[in-house]
Image: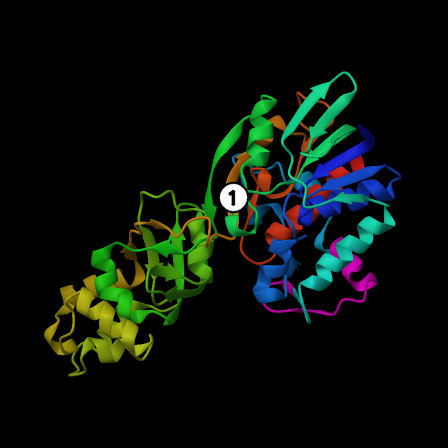
């Protein structure tokens, strides 16, 4: 039996951040990772360049059953704090758009930086090393692996959610939470492409690869960015964003002409001989205009449509309702929505309120950020909070 002050299970973004901070505080730390590679979600993120934070990150950019939970951690470890670490390690970066910061070279720079920070804290590693059991006794927590048992005073669960199972995602963190009596909000894929039913695919499936600037809304979510037609349905930034707000039952509302008075624009051409698809092609990709008009049975010349029909068309252009048939699942999702219920955690330390010295951080917790670096910022902030306390 080897003894440590802190054991962190999961060597992803949050786990490495937590281990590094705890180690640099002088704690004796063991970091256990069941997968054979470290920080794989970091490596594959941002097209291999890692959108490592967003300078605009605030609680408004996160979803949770308890929306205020993330405030404390985000306030105490901000994007500026992480950027200073990046700069200290000499990693070149740039802002792409909307506050999103990316590495100039490769996401592996961020992985290497976190490993270096762990080395500074003299963190010990075990990987690949699956954990077969966790128990709490008088001497603290016991972590059982196939080869050895480890004991610690503080245990941190940083095993992530269910996204991208091919790189090691498992429900381990949820099972540990339930083992110790913590509630878990049912997880589901988020920031994920959406599928369309066969009848909708028959109308729009040929548009695969075409994108259009649009505003998509559902519930409390509203995003204006590109939507991308695919051979299975809809993707693109606006769709990924709104997927976190879609409950699987209500249609999405898509404004195909954001910022444009569609009714006034159509009325201005009411007496012309131009066919509606050709007119819409002035504002939309031609193939989208043609497919949409065919689906709406509105391909006639403008002068033949009539005032009432033009009003209906304008309304549909601004409020095109699309009901997805489902998501493309965890293999295509960027994050997991839901997770360990924040009502059972301290917002200051990430510790379980009923189990002293048991911590949950990162994606395993019911805090989910928008697309654009927000989820990494939550990993850094929650990992730092637990690393300060464990």
Residue 348: image quadrant is top right
SS assignment at label 1: loop
Residue situated in front as seen by the camera: 162 or 340? 162
**Above or below for 341 versus 234:** above
Q: Which residues are magenta?
A: 81-101
Residue at image x 75%, y 59%? Answer: 112
Would residue 121 be found to the left or right of residue 207 on screen?
Answer: right
Residue situated in front as seen by the camera: 360 or 143? 143
Q: Quadrant of the C terminus?
A: top right
Mark 1, residue position: 162
Q: Residue furthest front?
A: 147
Residue at image x 27%, y 73%? Answer: 289
Labels in figure, total:
1
Residue situated in front as seen by the camera: 155 or 246? 155
Q: Is residue 376 magenta?
A: no
Q: Residue furthest bottom?
A: 273
Where's residue 356, x and y in %?
A: 72, 23
Is residue 364 visible in the rendered structure shown here? yes
Q: Is residue 96 magenta?
A: yes
Q: How is the image coloured?
A: rainbow
Residue at image x 46%, y 54%? Answer: 332
Q: Quadrant of the N terminus?
A: top right
Is residue 74 visible in the rendered structure shown here? no
**Above or below for 26 versus 104:** above
Where's residue 123, x and y in %?
A: 82, 44
Where's residue 243, x and y in %?
A: 42, 51
**Above or below for 20 versus 279:** above
Where's residue 354, x and y in %?
A: 66, 20
Residue at image x 72%, y 59%? Answer: 110
């Amino acid at each position: 039996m080897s003894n440590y002050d802190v054991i962190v299970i999961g060597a992803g973004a949050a786990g490495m951040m937590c281990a590094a901070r705890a180690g640099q505080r002088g704690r004796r730390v063991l970091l256990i990772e069941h997968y054979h590679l470290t920080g794989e979600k970091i490596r594959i993120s941002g097209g291999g360049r890692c959108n490592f934070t967003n300078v605009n990150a605030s609680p408004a950019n996160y979803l949770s059953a308890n929306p205020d939970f993330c405030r404390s951690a985000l306030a105490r470890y901000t994007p500026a704090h992480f950027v200073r670490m990046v700069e200290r390690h000499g990693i070149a970066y740039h802002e792409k758009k909307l506050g999103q910061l990316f590495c100039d070279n490769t996401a592996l720079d961020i992985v290497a930086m976190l490993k270096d920070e762990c080395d500074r804290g003299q963190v010990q590693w075990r990987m690949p090393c699956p954990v077969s059991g966790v128990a709490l006794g008088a001497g603290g927590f016991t972590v059982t692996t196939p080869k050895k048992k480890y004991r610690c005073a503080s245990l941190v669960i940083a095993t992530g959610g269910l996204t991208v199972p091919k790189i090691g995602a498992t429900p381990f963190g949820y099972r540990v939470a339930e083992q110790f009596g913590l509630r878990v909000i049912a997880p589901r894929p988020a920031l994920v492409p959406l599928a369309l039913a066969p009848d909708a695919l028959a109308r729009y499936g040929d548009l695969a690869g075409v994108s259009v600037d649009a505003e998509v809304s559902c519930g409390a979510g509203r995003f204006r960015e590109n939507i991308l037609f695919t051979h299975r349905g809809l993707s693109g930034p606006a769709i990924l964003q709104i997927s976190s707000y879609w409950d699987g039952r209500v249609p999405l509302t898509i404004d195909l002409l954001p910022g444009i008075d569609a009714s006034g624009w159509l009325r201005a051409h009411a007496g012309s001989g131009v066919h509606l698809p050709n007119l819409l092609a002035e504002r939309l990709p031609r193939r989208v205009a043609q497919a949409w008009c065919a689906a709406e049975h509105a391909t006639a010349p403008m002068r033949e449509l009539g005032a009432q029909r033009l009003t209906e068309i304008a309304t549909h252009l601004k409020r095109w309702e699309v009901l997805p048939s489902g998501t493309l699942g965890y293999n295509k999702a960027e994050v997991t929505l839901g997770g360990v219920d924040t009502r059972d955690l301290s917002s200051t330390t990430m510790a379980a309120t009923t189990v002293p010295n048991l911590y949950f951080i990162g994606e395993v917790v019911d805090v989910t950020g928008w697309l654009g670096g927000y989820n990494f910022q939550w990993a850094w902030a929650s990992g730092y909070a637990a690393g300060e306390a464990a």
